[in-house]
Image: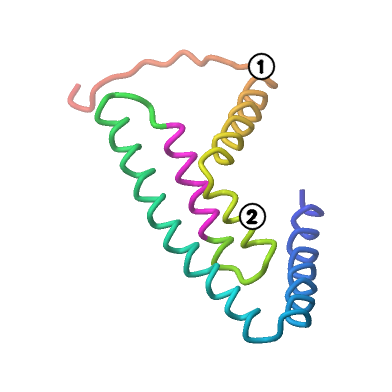
Amino acid sequence: MLLRLFLVFTLVPLVELFLLIELGRLLGLMPTLAIVITTGAVGAWLTRRQGLKALAAVRSDVEHGIVPAAGLLDGVLILAAGLLLLTPGLLTDTAGLLLLVPRVRTAIRGTAKRAIQRRLEIGPTEVIDTTWRSPEE
């Protein structure tokens, strides 16, 4: 796990830097800066809009007595999209914009659900018998 984090935090910035330099070489400084700033601004706007929509869905689920698992996971993915979009770079912007596409989030949500279920099924469960009592007793 530590190796993966090390690779992510070293390779991704290097690839981002390389892509930005190449884009700057192809288009020039001002168009490259405009692309980075525009994707950040549009991404922030989209993230806010979809984040508020996800929050409304969570509230609605809670009001109807439904566990808001999908809405909460959507909220986490939208937050991740916002963080990726605020990070300058083409790769992170692309990943952030993809996370803002509802169908992509649905696919990731399904994958995450299966991964969580596998993790829960791995180990044996042990039930500990307990007694509950009210603090007034």
**Which secondary structure lies at badge 2?**
helix
Q: Which residue is mark 1?
A: 124
What residue sits 63% from the left and 26% below the top?
A: 114
Q: Which mark is residue 114?
A: none
Q: Which range is magenta?
A: 69-82
Indicate the position of residue 3 as horizontal and vertical percent values: 82, 54
What residue sits 46% from the left and 33% below the top?
A: 70
Classify 101 as above or below 23: above
**Which secondary structure lies at badge 1?**
loop
Indicate the position of residue 20 as horizontal and vertical percent values: 73, 75
Q: Is residue 110 left or right of residue 53?
A: right
Considering depth in this image, is 38 or 105 the residue closer to the camera? 38
Considering depth in this image, is 80 or 89 the residue closer to the camera? 89
Q: Is residue 73 left or right of residue 96?
A: left
Classify 62 as above or below 132: below
What kind of colouring is applied to the model shown? rainbow
Q: How far apart, in angstroms, are the residues tagged by discs 1 and 2?
A: 36 Å
Q: Is residue 11 left or right of residue 62?
A: right
What residue sits 62% from the left and 62% below the top?
A: 93
Q: Specify the principal SS of the magenta part.
A: helix
Q: Are marks 1 and 2 in contact (CB under 8 Å)?
A: no
Q: Which residue is mark 2?
A: 95
Classify 48 as above or below 23: above
Amino acid type of the residue that numbered disc 1 sits on in the rendered structure:
Pro
Label 2 neighbour load within 10 Å: few <14, some 14-19, many 20+ = some
Q: Image quadrant of residue 16?
A: bottom right
